[in-house]
Image (cartoon, rainbow, N blue to C red):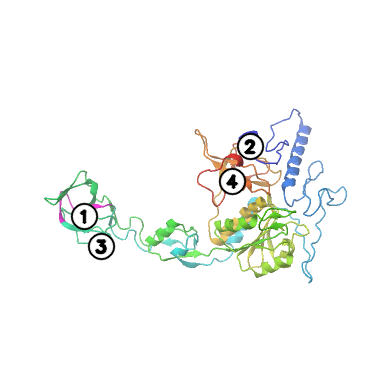
Amino acid sequence: MTGGDLPGGDLPGRNGTPGSIPAAGNGTTGPDSALARAAAEELAVEQALALVGGRSHARTPVNGQVGDQAPRNQAPGEPTGAAGDPHPSPSPQPPPYSTSATPSFSPSPTPDLPWDRARAVAARAGRGGPRAVVRLPLDRALGHVLAEPLAALTDLPSFDTSAMDGWAVAGPGPWTYEEGVSLLAGVGESPAPALPDGTAVRIATGARTPADTTAVIRSEHAQVDEARRLVSTRRPVVTGQDIRPRGQECRSGDQLVPAGTVVTPAVLGLAAAAGYDALPAVPRPRVDVLVLGDELLAAGLPHDGLIRDALGPMLGPWLRALGAEVSVPRRLGDDARALREALTASDADLIVTTGGTASGPVDHVHPVLAALGAELLVDGVAVRPGHPMLLARLSPDGPHLVGLPGNPLAAVSGLLTLAEPLLAGLAGRPAQDAYRALVHADVPGHPHDTRLVPVVHRVGRAGGRDHVAPLRYNGPAMLRGIAAADGLAVVPAGGVRSGTEVEILDLPWAPATPWTEGCFT
């Protein structure tokens, strides 16, 4: 990659240039200059991230200045607290959403959870309750998760069968045969009469071999003397050759696949071969999607301060790729009453909301959850983008709610941080295996939080190792980078240099080989 291709888009690196990581030293020496450089670098990154971030907790750099984004609907530069106070004042109470008395609520000031801890909380929440089991016919089981181990109901194969078209022979050759007699799969006596030594019979692939069969000679290896009705072979005969013995693949009762296996077409075929007509499966989690925001358009071009809803069309297919059944997204606008009614009426296992998770005057998710007595399991995650995400349980036996930020890439971050591990637990799926890959560029980091950066896998050239390349368009409101990605790199605070291994989260549709080039990288 050239310098212009480094990740970050309009995100400055630590020396103030786009997508760069500073070289050691800048011509000055000594501890004071080093501290000053560190403070300046941290402030530069913090201010840049605040420009593209959503809700932000105040952080106090060494010089006492704060680079936080103003709350929603507040003009840039408008004071956020008392004069000279670098920390914002508590958010004003949101207006009541009904004529009845409503408990006031402000988000907890507790620190954001570390990213890995937030994912662990979501995974535990998904595994917490008893799991239902349904028996699904084979033609309806695809994509579900097995609720129980799949044990063989019979030996496979259930009798000795021919692996090839040819001749079943007994004893040493040459072998005599009877004209017009052959053994076909599923046709004729079952089982066939025993085969005397020195004799042969034509046999088709999959047909049951007669008792006392020594081997099967493939048609292309046999020499047939039709006048004498003799069969000989051009190659030595090995006992048992080209015969699939009973139980070669499994014996009755053997475990074929464990519980938690996703039912693929191959699993369906194996189950059918083993005698199953229906499979014990975990029901797919049911998900409702609620799109919040008065500024969102469902069609047409953005205009007059209105923008297109990118999350409504994206979340349904994404959640289905994670194994859920998803209702048609509902657009509620910034209406607290409608949000409360939608939450109380839902019979889904998971409700996903978009936007409204911060503390602005029309951010209603927190106060509505408080009014419903919901339990907040995660309230903010130390990750960029997407840190004002949340996970709640509406009642001890009720559905979970994942609140996603409104910015598209921030919402993707919340989806993979909280919704993906939660749905895996609800569906009985195993957690995504963590793995690491080399990153082929310097990647700036947030001073304090984890960053999730869209990447694409690349095949190593000229003996080089496979690696991932960061994608440029990775701002919280951008989808261009994630549309070209097949994974997200988990970048620790402070960033990483080229050649460092980073944890990778695969996207549900990650291809086996890279496919993106050009303007995306």
Secondary structure of residue under mark 1? strand
Q: Residue at x 71, y 67 (%)?
A: 338
Name the front one of labels 2 and 1.
2
The span from disc 3 to disc 2 (Cα, nearest Å) is: 67 Å
Name the front one of labels 3 and 4.
4
**Residue 484 badge:** 4
In this picture, which residue range is highlighted in magenta? 164-178
Q: Amino acid at mark 3?
A: Val
**Residue 123, visible in the rendered structure:** no
Which mark is first along the chain, 1 or 2?
Answer: 2
Which mark is first along the chain, 4 or 3?
Answer: 3
The span from disc 3 to disc 4 (Cα, nearest Å) is: 54 Å
Name above or below for residue 396 compared with residue 166.
Answer: below
Secondary structure of residue under mark 2? helix
The image position of residue 243, as x and y in percent, is 27, 53
Specify the farthest residue to the top.
27
The span from disc 4 to disc 1 (Cα, nearest Å) is: 57 Å
Name the front one of labels 4 and 1.
4
Q: Amino acid at mark 2?
A: Asp
Return the residue at label 2.
5
Return the residue at label 3.
187
